Amino acid sequence: MKRLTSAICFSALLFSAAASAQDNPEWAIALHGGAGVIERGDMSPAMEAEYRAALEDALRLGAGQLEIGASALDAVEVTIRTMEDDPKFNSGKGAVFTAAGRNELDASIMDGETLNAGAVAGVTRVRHPITLARLVMTDSPHVMLAGSGAETFAEEAGAELVAPSHFFTERRWQSLLRTLEEKGLPAPDRPEGVAAPEEETVDDAALNLMEREHKFGTVGVVAVDREGNIAAGTSTGGTTAKLWGRVGDSPIIGAGTYASNESCAVSGTGTGEYFIRLTVASAVCDHVKYKGEDIQTAADAVIHGDLTELGGDGGVVAMTPDGAVAFSFNTPGMYRGHLRAGEEPKVMIYGDED
Ligand code: ASP
């Protein structure tokens, strides 16, 4: 069994600090649940507790797999699956809506040991896009499948299919209507098969938070297993009111997700149009591989350097095969956490937490 040395660092805005770390964890997992304008006072104590509990539960689930010897890939997939079922996050159920009133889901996964990868874009009936992404990797000759073709493959590969209304949540719908109104765009019809509006009340605080979160909420996980292999995965509904089959960075290997045992594993969240052009995820790993930077320095160079200079916003969670973890984001907050063998889970939301 490979013993891992580790250091955990955090960075928000211009803040960057190394936190204490236990030496040699046998495995480690870290995740994000989206970045954005999430500030103290935006959330009620109850809402904040719900988010923290959801992040912790997800971490514990993935960690439980790593503890019993599962691969980093398995841990990434199982952790993202549970977040895809949680309507608090913008992935699977609870995904944001397109301008046309649909949920179009994107996901990707990458194995750092083999550099195998799988991705899906614009799927509307797949309960767990991350699992379909993994099936693309393992059961198809391709890396990325999109739209109806991806769903045909999902049927053949045995991925769980659901009605599009499965992904509907009233608060995301109300958020879409608000966004379309602000942009002067027409509101689509309410999707078929969903409850009437009065049957689910929308908490104003929750709606305001979504606006301030920049409508993000993508989920991403990185992990290293007992063999020292790393993996990364990302799943999202994209951005609210996205147009014409828009695809963001999350399903693009190198942009939203990357993993290589030679460098690092990364999952990003933020404005995909910037992450794609900067190939953010692989750029972080290139800093590690070619410049020999530690993971925090590498993540900060891309997020506080290149991304910020180009005008993009968002962040990453990153991990090296020796178990070092970095969070870096140029937004006021990012839902995030980590858990390593022998430690208690640590979850954070605001930029000043470490
Ligand atoms: N990166 C995602 C996208 O652009 C959105 C997000 O992370 O919230 O599709």
Image: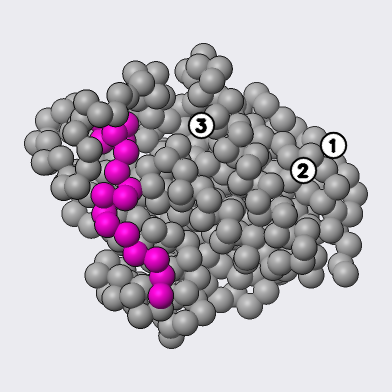
Q: Can I make out residue 246 in this image?
A: no
Q: Is residue 130 left or right of 304 when viewed as pictured?
A: left
Q: How is the image coloured?
A: one colour
Is 312 located above or below residue 249 in the figure?
above
Looking at the rendered image, the quarter that the N terminus falls into is bottom right
Amino acid type of disc 3?
A: Thr
Q: Residues within 10 Å of mark 1 (few under 14, many from 20)?
A: few
User: For residue 335: magenta?
Assistant: no
- Residue furthest to the top: 41
Callout 2 secondary element: strand
Q: Whole-Å distance between the Cαs marked 3 and 1?
A: 24 Å
Residue 331: assigned label: 3
Read off the residue under disc 1.
20
Q: Residue at x 32, y 38 (%)?
A: 169
Q: Which residue is drawn at 33% across and 75% down?
A: 155
Amino acid type of disc 1?
A: Ser
Which quadrant would residue 287 be assigned to in this image? Answer: bottom right
**Dot in front, 3 or 1:** 1
Q: Which residue is drawn at 25% across and 29% down?
A: 199
Is 86 located above or below residue 136 in the figure?
above
Q: Which residue is drawn at 29% across and 43% down?
A: 168
Proximity of marks 2 and 1: CB atoms separated by less than 8 Å: yes
- Residue furthest to the bottom: 141
Amino acid type of disc 2?
A: Ile
Read off the residue under disc 2.
8
Callout 3 secondary element: loop
**Which tag, 3 or 1, sits closer to the chain's start?**
1
Magenta-colored span? 158-174
User: For residue 161: magenta?
Assistant: yes
